[in-house]
Amino acid sequence: MASRTGRHGAARSARGGSRPRLPLRLLLPLLLLVALVAMLMLRGYVHSEILADHRVQPPAATTDVPEKILEGGPVIDARGGRTESLSVPDHRLVLTFDDGPDPTWTPRVLDVLKKHDAHAVFFVTGTMASRYPDLVERMVDEGHEVGLHTFNHPDLSFQSKKRIDWELSQNQLAITGAAGVRTSLFRPPYSSFADAMDNKSWPVTEYIGSRGYLVVVNNTDSEDWKKPGVEEIIRRATPKGGKGAIVLMHDSGGDRHQTVQALDRFLPDLKKKGYEFDNLTEALDAPSAMTPVSGAELWKGRAWVFLVQASEHLTDGLVVGLAIIGTLVIGRFGLMLLLSGVHARRVRRRRFRWGPAVTEPVTVLVPAYNEAKCIENTVRSLVASDHPVEVIVIDDGSSDGTARIVEGLGLPGVRVIRQLNAGKPAALNRGLANARYDIVVMMDGDTVFEPATVRELVQPFGDPKVGAVAGNAKVGNKDSLIGAWQHIEYVMGFNLDRRMYDVLGCMPTIPGAVGAFRRSALEPIGGMSDDTLAEDTDVTMALHRAGWRVVYAENARAWTEAPESVSQLWSQRYRWSYGTMQAIWKHRRAVIEKGPSGRFGRVGLPFVSLFMVVAPLLAPLIDVFLLYGLVFGPTDKTIVAWLGVLAIQAVCAAYAFRLDREKLTPLISLPLQQILYRQIMYVVLLQSWITALTGGRLRWQKLRRSGGVSAPPPGADGVPPQRRP
């Protein structure tokens, strides 16, 4: 219910001339969403799932390549318009390792090099250097040289000059962020010997040279990537006749244990033959290829590495979260199916009785605020009850004549109590104070009962241990799409849940639309509290802690008018979510208490917190990874996984509809509900979390009603007339 202050404040704000500002509770979820998308995109880029190009150019003619390049050495200098090639002097070997760093194999390669006091050149990709910067730093610290191998490892002969510049700059940025240096060495992906240069690759080599880089290919290929065996790797990597060579090896891209083993034998054997293992510039007696970086460029590199590491940790956490939520969702579905079946079999046994039949009159409290469109249907449905009732309508300061409408009906056994607008808990407490009977039924002013609803609702009080009963709330206006989605949610998400919670003995909420209480149970706990926005959840938890049993009466059907627009739905669910969090926090001490309170605290509170607050907050990960997988990942597997989750939900929904004797037709919209409706619920819950964490306050909000809900006759919707106790 909205307070007068809230309504007038909103009106003043609407009339004011100040520019509307996005509330913090809306801005923060939006910023979190943007940050999450940015981190996922960054992760996808660094893992070569975004902007990656895996095409490889077939060999082409060599007519445009200078003869001295084709017949020259493996180091090509095209800087400053030069066209020169260089070779490594005799008895000098330059070991080069491509495609790293790799967290498994690069450290082992570095260990072997350090063991034998040898240097090498590591041509690192930007993706791997960004993900494992500590290994690049170790390479530099231990005296090795690093070179560029592009960022995403594309065949540059397919790329534009703009893309080539991007690959170079991003690769350089990653090296700078990792080790604080720049390098002038470059090795093209998919390169081979100098004599393999052709009309497609030579223009790229010239352009790379014009950007100031020394292009390094090789003239000795160990072919270790084929894993031919240690002996074969050593044979292929050994130059003939004591000549110098640039040897191609790999420290990434797969299982490199043969490379490590071969290296451990290769180094000492060739050292005995007089070979030296130097960096490239050492072997050529040239200035170092690496220069320190400082200032803004250094900080840009460090910022880049920091962001990549953050995206890696975030996505790793998301994957763990997805695994957790997947396990929880499937486990919850399984538990719901099992326990709801147990509940249905128990209460549907032919001889099942809660106890002696409850036949004495009960009081029905109807708190109402501006319910002029609905209140007549509500009150008339109560008067038609087949159980003796006293009806008290508490008008909470309505401005639309709600009280006059009820009084004008002149229905027997119906009283109207007026009060200034004070909120729903105050209205209910006012009704409790005026109730004649110990059993009190509470309902909303927009809800209608079937003739048997009150009778079915109060029968569990035949058990003296029962302090409260939850009824079966149904969506009355389910003809629209959003109404059908809420109908699915009510049948599957609420009523199936209540069966499960009944069996577990930790029912979290007596729905405000249809619930019954012993007044003798409510009075010791102070009646309905206004400490939270979910007074129904609050009082239910308090009753559990006081030792009362709370149960579910499946045949006590009530038809309520669900929100008909997204904005109204948002307001309602925002209040529910935030109020539930308040109630959990209010009753948190039950976890450490003894007796009934402790039992609820150690069973009910964790269960409710996990499945009503935490799990729904993590559930969006399913949709986040679905969207990411559809765009960038393995689309087929992503679709199959999502369809699998949908199938599980469909089975649970169909079972819930069968238990409630509902037609399955609305389930046609279940896939669309999962795509659209759930997103609203996710954001609402996230907004509730932010409101709670920022200490925000949320007022009651009144939903606009159409008054179109009325109780169907017994037997409608395939439901047989309800049995008498």
Image (spheres, rainbow, N blue to C red):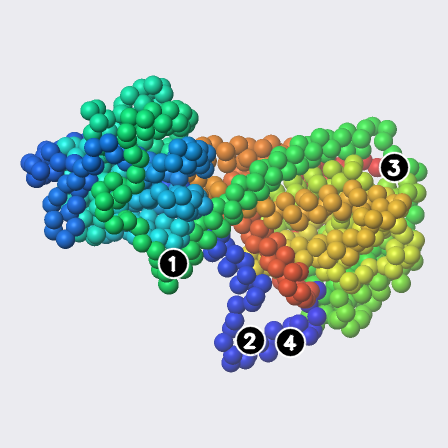
- Can you tell which of label 2 and label 3 is closer to the viewer? 2
Residue type indicated by callout 3: Trp
Numbered mark located on residue 354 in the image: 3
Residue type indicated by callout 4: His
- Front in this rendered view, residue 660 or 501: 501
- Front in this rendered view, residue 140 or 21: 140
Left or right of residue 653, residue 550 in this image: right
Query: Disc 2 designates what residue?
Result: 14
Give the number of callouts.
Answer: 4
Q: Earlier in the sequence, mark 1 or mark 4?
A: 4
Left or right of residue 511, residue 302 in this image: left
Local packing at callout 1 (Cα closer than 10 Å; few below 14, some 14-19, many 20+) is: many
Local packing at callout 2 (Cα closer than 10 Å; few below 14, some 14-19, many 20+) is: few
Rendered view: 163 above or below 97: below
Left or right of residue 133, residue 166 in this image: left
Query: Disc 4 designates what residue?
Result: 8
The answer to the question of whether label 4 and label 3 lie on touching residues, with beta carbons closer than 8 A, is no
Q: Earlier in the sequence, mark 4 or mark 3?
A: 4
Spatial separation of the CA atoms under disc 1 and disc 2 = 50 Å
Element class at badge 2:
helix
Residue type indicated by callout 1: Leu
Q: Residue 334 occupies which quadrant of the picture?
A: top right
Query: Disc 1 designates what residue?
Result: 298
Q: Quadrant of the C terminus?
A: top right
Q: Quadrant of the N terminus?
A: bottom right
- Across and down, in percent, residue 436 comes to 92, 58
